[in-house]
Amino acid sequence: MIDRLKVMWAVSLHETGRHLASQRMLLLAPLILFFLGAACWGFSDPRFIPPADITVDGPAGALFLASVVTVLVCTLAVVLVGFDAISRRRLTGELAIDLSQPMPRSDFAVTQLLGVWMAVMLPTLVGILIGVALIHEQMGAWPSALDLAVFILATGLLLWWYTCLQLLASSMARDLGSAVTFGVGTWMLFTLLWVMVTAVVAAFNGVAVTDMTSPSWDALSEQLDLLSPNGVYQLLLETRLAEDSQPQIAAGWIWFAALVWTGLPKFLFIWRMHRIKP
């Protein structure tokens, strides 16, 4: 078992290095560092005036607002890095060679997931640490260890969820165009269009969609957010805010949803890899 894990880890590191050395990561990594640093610096600036329904009550609040970068930039980086992780191998015949090696397909699938995830998580983690230092420079205070740990953990989970979804889409696509379409389409659904899904469901349930500050809208929105990786991510971060800004849903349900999102897409990808015909 230990030898098997060593082999998986070695292959995962190889895949991570390959992705980090790719031309797309040479562009994406600086963008991740820049936008995370800029967001933390800007949202912690004493001159920053937040919207009426948002308060920045300390380093944790500034870090929470900076999470918009992870939702928009870091998740898109996962899509751009992983869209051809399986489909390109399939087209070139490399996948047939990989699957013929004396490694279980489930182990191979996990190494591909870890390779993409670590390649994006590493610059994201560096960007978070730089951002925390910039927040301290602006506010003269550090986020608490628990706030920072929850932020890093939630961000890692979000990138893992998108990695599983993207590689699942890549394994189902038969050409690179379809892989890009599936990946970007999934990203747009959860990032840009989910509010429309919430509005449609609210209309069918008799909830006024013109007042997005009403308690009924907030309750329904939080329930539907459990079905979205971005929504679960935001709910996880909100559990570390002030009491009046915390979600109405119990924290246990939020962490349960995070557990489901962590395991189910991974299971589906491994299941797909067991049945794929290269």
Image (spheres, helix red, strand yellow):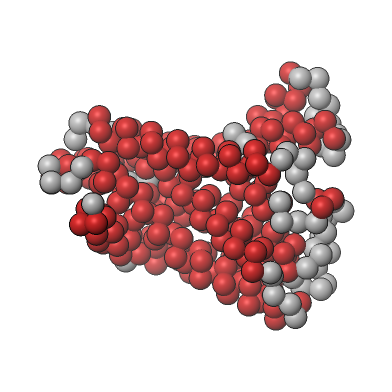
Residue 7, image x, y percentages: 22, 57
Question: Where 161 sits versus 124, above or below?
Answer: above
In the rendered view, does 88 fall on the left or right side of 122?
left
* Quarter of the image where one finds residue 165: top left
Residue lying at the far front in this picture: please name it: 1
Residue 170, image x, y percentages: 35, 39
Residue 122, image x, y percentages: 44, 65
Q: Nearer the viewer, residue 47 or 260?
A: 260
Residue 234, image x, y percentages: 66, 48
Residue beneath the point at 75% across and 62% down: 61
Q: Nearer the viewer, residue 236 or 66?
A: 236
Tally of numbered tags: 0
Residue beneath the point at 28% across and 59% down: 9
In the rendered view, does 140 fall on the left or right side of 128?
right
State whether residue 128 appears in this view: yes
State whether residue 72 appears in this view: no
In the rendered view, does 240 fall on the left or right side of 12?
right
User: In the picture, which quadrant includes the C terminus?
Assistant: top left
Residue beneath the point at 33% across and 61% down: 16
In the rendered view, does 278 fall on the left or right side of 255?
left
* Quarter of the image where one finds residue 257: top right
Residue beneath the point at 76% across and 56% down: 241
